[in-house]
Image: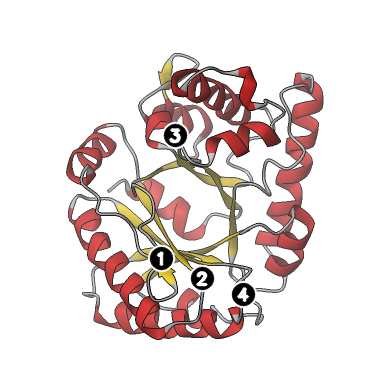
């Protein structure tokens, strides 16, 4: 593991940019970017367009390591180039931004109020490629719809099981058990999740750390015990459907929690904006998220 990247991730001031929309969420991301579905004929064209959007973000003058510590890439983005250089290498060498890659293969059907991750049949090969391309860590997402103890325990067990394999490959796992902001009792779900994660963290060997990506909590500073846990490198928050303003207001009330936003980061950014307008809006979004992440 790259120690310079680890140090940047452990103590850097700023946030993580989540640019890892997968095939299922790409049409919505493109629509928000101002590109309708009738603008492309197939998946290849769709993925080319989303890569152009991500490249525009990453190469923007506003997108710098002063405020963006790391970026989570989609697997296809990792396998592509930015300005003629491997995406991960461009991020680290040209921007000094730590690269991560999304490794899960989507969600299974709902059971016990949650959606586990589908079996990761490509994980071993993906981890080898990621290491070869200079990726620092990975991200994998589960989804919690209801405060169901059985379901939440199953999600956390699965996340930590895969985290062991990822750590064994020399990469830093980001564990992301997202709680729906539409959950019928989100505070209860948040509390059950914190307890389940804490128990698993206590079981980790002394030389192991993970990162956590969690939904912004309803109770301020709920994640403080996780942020302070010696087995946790960093705790980051997803926006989960909240607007940029709402996300930043909640984030700013949670000491030590930093952002890892996707939709909130790209809010208001469209293909139709000129480069100057695009950079100005992106810079404004970044400033807002940065300010909330360092409070």
Indicate which disc residue 110 carries. Answer: 1
SS under mark 1: loop
Indicate which disc residue 225 carries. Answer: none
Indicate which disc residue 92 carries. Answer: 3
In the image, 94 versus 88, the foreground residue is 88
Residue matched to label 4: 217
- Dots 2 and 1: beta carbons under 8 Å? yes
Residue 199 in the image: state x and y as whole percent: 33, 84
**Structural distance between the alpha carbons of marks 3 and 2:** 36 Å
Between tags 1 and 3, which lies in front? Answer: 1
Q: Earlier in the sequence, mark 3 or mark 2?
A: 3
- Residue pictured at 35% horizontal, 58% vertical: 108
Q: Earlier in the sequence, mark 4 or mark 3?
A: 3
**Structural distance between the alpha carbons of marks 2 and 1:** 9 Å
- Residue pictured at 50% horizontal, 39% vertical: 97
- Residue pictured at 50% horizontal, 81% vertical: 147
- Dots 4 and 3: beta carbons under 8 Å? no
Query: Left or right: 175 with respect to 36?
Result: left
Residue 250 in the image: state x and y as whole percent: 72, 69
Residue 133 in the image: state x and y as whole percent: 30, 31
Q: Earlier in the sequence, mark 1 or mark 3?
A: 3
Query: Left or right: 268 with respect to 112?
Result: right
- Residue pictured at 34% horizontal, 58% vertical: 117
Query: Left or right: 140 with respect to 62?
Result: left
Residue matched to label 2: 145
């Amino acid at each position: 593991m790259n120690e310079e990247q680890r140090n940047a991730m452990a103590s850097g001031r700023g946030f993580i940019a989540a640019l890892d929309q997968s095939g299922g969420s790409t049409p919505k991301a493109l629509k928000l970017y101002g590109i309708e579905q009738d603008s492309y004929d197939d998946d290849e064209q769709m993925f080319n367009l989303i890569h152009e959007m991500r490249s525009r973000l990453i190469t923007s003058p506003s997108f710098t390591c002063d405020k963006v510590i790391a970026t989570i890439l989609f697997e296809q983005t990792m396998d592509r180039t930015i300005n003629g250089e491997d995406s991960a290498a461009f991020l680290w060498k040209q921007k000094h931004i730590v690269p991560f890659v999304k490794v899960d293969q989507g969600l299974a059907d709902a059971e016990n109020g949650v959606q586990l991750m589908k079996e990761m049949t490509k994980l071993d090969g993906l981890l080898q490629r990621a290491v070869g391309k200079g990726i620092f860590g990975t991200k994998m997402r589960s989804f919690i719809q209801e405060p169901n103890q059985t379901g939440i325990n199953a999600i956390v067990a699965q996340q930590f099981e895969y985290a062991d394999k990822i750590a064994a490959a020399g990469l830093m796992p980001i564990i992301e058990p997202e709680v729906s902001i539409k959950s019928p009792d989100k505070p209860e779900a948040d509390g059950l999740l914190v307890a389940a994660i804490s128990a698993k963290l206590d079981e980790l060997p002394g030389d192991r750390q993970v990162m956590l990506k969690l939904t912004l909590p309803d109770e301020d500073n709920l994640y403080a015990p996780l942020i302070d846990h010696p087995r946790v490198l960093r705790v980051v928050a997803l926006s989960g459907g909240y607007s940029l303003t709402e996300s930043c207001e909640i984030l700013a009330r949670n000491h030590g929690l930093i952002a890892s936003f996707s939709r909130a980061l790209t809010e208001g950014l469209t293909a139709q904006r000129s480069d100057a307008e695009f950079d100005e809006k992106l810079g404004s979004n970044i400033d807002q998220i940065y300010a909330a992440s360092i409070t």
